[in-house]
Image: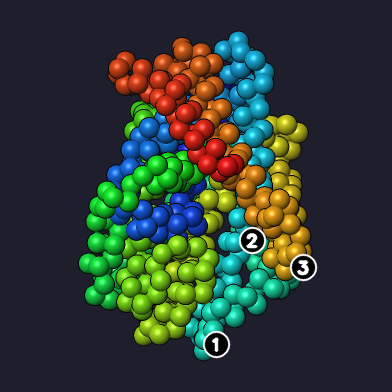
Amino acid sequence: MDKTTSIHGMWSSRLTFILAATGSAVGLGNIWRFPYMTSDNGGGAFVLVYLGCIAMVGLPILMAEVLIGRHGRMSPINTLRGLVRDSGVGKAWVGIGWIGIIAGILILSFYSVVAGWTLHYAWLYLKQLFGGAGITDPAATFTALLASPLELTFWHGLFMLLTVVVVAMGVEKGLERAVRFLMPALFLLLLVLVGYGMSTGYMGQSLTFLFRPDWSEIDGNVFLRAMGQAFFSLSLGMCTMMTYGAYLPREGISIPRVGIAVALTDTTVALLAGMAIFPIVLSFGLEPAGGGPGLIFTSLPLAFEAMSVGVVYGLLFFGLLAVAAWTSSISLLEPATAFMVEKFGIRRRKLAALAMAGLCWLLGLLSVLSLNVWSEVRIFDRSIMDFIELVANDLMLPLGGLLIALFTGWALNLTILREQLSEMPDGLFTAWRWLLRIVAPLLVLAVLASAVL
């Protein structure tokens, strides 16, 4: 196997990889969850704790995923098969790749349904821009959407179509072209919304709300939340970074440097989202705590309706959410598609991406129906959609991240590690390896335990 290139294609530059990896990390959760976690858990103190967790858990595992991918140059499952053979360890470690790919498929199945909501709302504001009716009762609008299986299925299908079109075109023509357009568009939309937030007169209060450190709020639970956010916000444990790492050139590209760039860019986007949302929330007297669908789809549209440029702002805001969801969904579909191409020798354009997208779409119908027709069905006292999210997001991802840390720290051949991280000084390399061996596994176990108990 040629370890210098991937059969699927290669990123043309370090910047492209950073854009792609950041696009994978930045999703709906970053846009609406991180700012509220920050404000509710000590403000600036939480940000510092979060950055510490990134350094201790997120960045070490991110680097591990990227170097595994860059060495193997294949889909996660086949990359791990090669590494297991080269390192002379048990074949059970290949299960990491299966966990990541299955988790990605499950997550994309319900993520696409939620992302479809953003497309629906963007469409509503686009129609309003051209004379359509306004959203005068956001709660009723949102309830009506969730109650309609046909409408949810349409938007879920449209979002999956947008995702598969990019992935089916391959790395250079699909993924790379998409992130080169979508990530600058995401930043531009964010900056426009932050600019409007500054005009409300509530930016100072919002910055205080976000960044004033309150160390009295910091306790064990807040630390666990920060660590969980650090882990999930970087898309770890689902092998997307491993897959993107397979397309990363070696010459002149430092894994630690690109890892730091991805982590900082991801955090910057999340904080900018807070600076865009909070001025609106505060200026209209909305409840800022909690975040989530209740605020995004019912409370904020009330504010947009009262704003002089509310229609434009609403269109831009939900367009931003859709772009963030799109960049993440592309990375969720890519690992399974790459494996299908390798396993069956089928052309990416014709069958691989379509087959995996079709599977995700079909599984997504379970989430669609759980919101209406099957709303009474419960699995361990959870709706079908919530149960799928629990299994994939709260259990499989931490498990995958834990196993990646243990595999890299204890099982992977030291020569391979040193080759991939040749630019790292010996002291930093040793510290990174022991973070993977001891610190990160213990902290990820704490996150996993908190999800289960």
> Secondary structure under badge 3?
loop
Image-based side of 151 in relation to 10, left or right = right
Q: Amino acid at mark 1?
A: Gly
Q: Is residue 120 above or below residue 31?
A: below
Residue 261: horizontal and vertical position, in percent? 35, 40
As drawn, the label of residue 113 is: 2
3D distance between C-alphas at marks 2 and 1:
25 Å
3D distance between C-alphas at marks 3 and 1:
30 Å
Q: Nearer the viewer, residue 217 or 67?
A: 217
Give the residue pinned by disc 1.
132
Q: Is residue 135 visible?
A: yes
Disc 3: CA contacts within 10 A as few (<14), some (14-19) or many (>=20): few
Q: Nearer the viewer, residue 242 or 405?
A: 405
> Secondary structure under badge 1?
loop
Residue 147: horizontal and vertical position, in percent? 69, 73
Disc 1: CA contacts within 10 A as few (<14), some (14-19) or many (>=20): few
Q: Quadrant of the N terminus?
A: top right
From the viewer's perspective, is the residue at label 2 or at label 1 nearer?
Answer: 2
Give the residue pinned by disc 3.
373
